Amino acid sequence: MKCYILLVAVLISGCATVSPQQLTPVEIKSVAAQDRTLASAGVDDVRGPLRLDEAIARALKYNLERRTRIMEEALAIRQFDVGAYDMLPRLVAGAGYSQRSQYLTTSSIDSVTGAPSLAHPFISSDREHWTADLGLTWSLLDFGLSYYNAKQNADRILIAAERRRKALHLLVQDVRTAFWRAASAQKLRDDLRRTIALADEALADSRTAERERIRAPLDSLRYQRQLLENVRLLESIEQDLGTARVELAHLVNAPLGRELVVEEADEGLNRRLLDTPVKEMEETAILRNADLRDQFYSAKVARDESRKILLRLFPGLSFNLDLRHDSDRFLVHQNWSDAGAQLSFSLVNLLSMPAQKKLAEAGVALADQRRMTTQMVVLAQLHVARLQYASAYQQFLRADAIYQVDERMNRIIAAGERAQSQSKLDRVSSDTTTILSLLRRYQALALVHAAASKLQATMGLEPEVPSVSSSSLQELTGVAAEFLRQTQGDAAAVAPKAP
């Protein structure tokens, strides 16, 4: 007995000594290094210029956030598989060991006189014995609850699939926007550096002229200030575009330190989106929008939950069958079986029934209200997205026309500067204006693609992606290219005209 007490005391003291343990810097660095290795495992290297369809395909296959959504869906499937076993009867096997310090010794008294029996106390159980049992139990109430749980888990698989679709829509939208921002950075990088160098050269000449008093001091200072304003504007543009490559590399899970080169695709603007009747868009959105379909399945889950609440109000009926064995030698029958049925009912349920019923009805009403609200929100988003796309499309056409004019003016001024009929300030100002126009053109193009992706996402349009794990990057690239071809229209206005 003392040994048992000592063992319990040791276990209790061991539990009492548990305290928070912070991770050491070495452990954090080790785990972080493993995470980086796993994040880049199996990622194909980027070879050559990156096209838009390949960027989308790489994001579909390698983007870490998309992997998370896929794993969430897989987890929902596993929960459904596990929940299906809850509807089966419970089969439980058990074994035990019992030990006493003394024999179980009993005595008796006469049932009539109450006098102690003259017989010696007798032993009715071994000091040590083993027990084993195998029991089968099935509850009708548990079966009903497990049935509705399985239905809810099945709907949660579909909810996870819709959320994965929504994440896919946002991913495609982000990739298209980041791609064209990276394209503009790549297109403007050399022109920016050349113009900044020309401005620095003109600024140095102006300061030399000021020191030698070739020009009036006020004219020189005005000249320098305008040059500095142009340089400041160019440097802010260069800084803003510098993050585009990192954003695109993050989305496609490419090394962040690598210099990505993008190839401007031929896919362009989707004029057909503006020509599609709004009524047809609304019907497509109602049928395919991920958020709305999510709410449809969530309403089904809420209805099953209400049925579970009402089901708990019914009596519980359970059946059991057990096979038992006991090694106690004093037992006449060491092996036996027993069976039974039990009916139970909580009297408190009679009192709570009205409240439980109202709770079930309130849950269903809330789910229906959310679905209705989501439908109205989706339709409003559709109309807003269509107007935004129309505006972005028009703004792109204007930005393209302005760029063409500025480009032609820049050619003339560049020729005049070479002929020394125009100053370097004029050349720098003209180059800055042209660069700014080209930047605004690319920004407008990125906004058009973002607006088109948002409109397509509202309607629930996405690439028909096969299994990512079993599909090669080349196959996914073909899927992305086909999606772009089907959803985009004339590409003539997309690529800047060659000067």
Image (spheres, grey):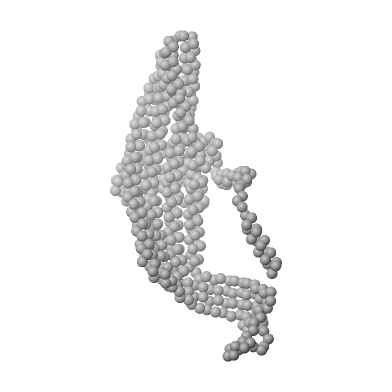
Left or right of residue 390, residue 176 in this image:
right
Is 36 or 446 nearer to us in this picture? 36
Is residue 452 shown above or below 158? above
What residue sits 38% from the left and 34% below the top? 444
Q: Determine the image quadrant of residue 484.
A: top left
Q: In the figure, 197 relative to 280: above or below? A: above
Q: Which residue, as the protein is rendered here, is positioned at the far right?
A: 3
- Image mark count: 0
Residue displayed at 41% across by 65% down:
308
Q: Nearer the viewer, residue 454 or 267?
A: 454
Residue at the image point whose x is 49% and y is 53% from the top: 72
Q: Position of residue 200 (x, y in %)?
A: 49, 20
One can see residue 419 in this view: no
Residue 14 image point, x, y percent: 65, 58
Camera-nearest residue between 188 and 147: 147
Residue 305, horizontal then vertical, whole percent: 41, 62
Instruction: Name the quadrant of the C terminus.
Output: top left
Location of residue 319 with respect to 357 vertically, above or below: below
Direction top: furthest residue: 213
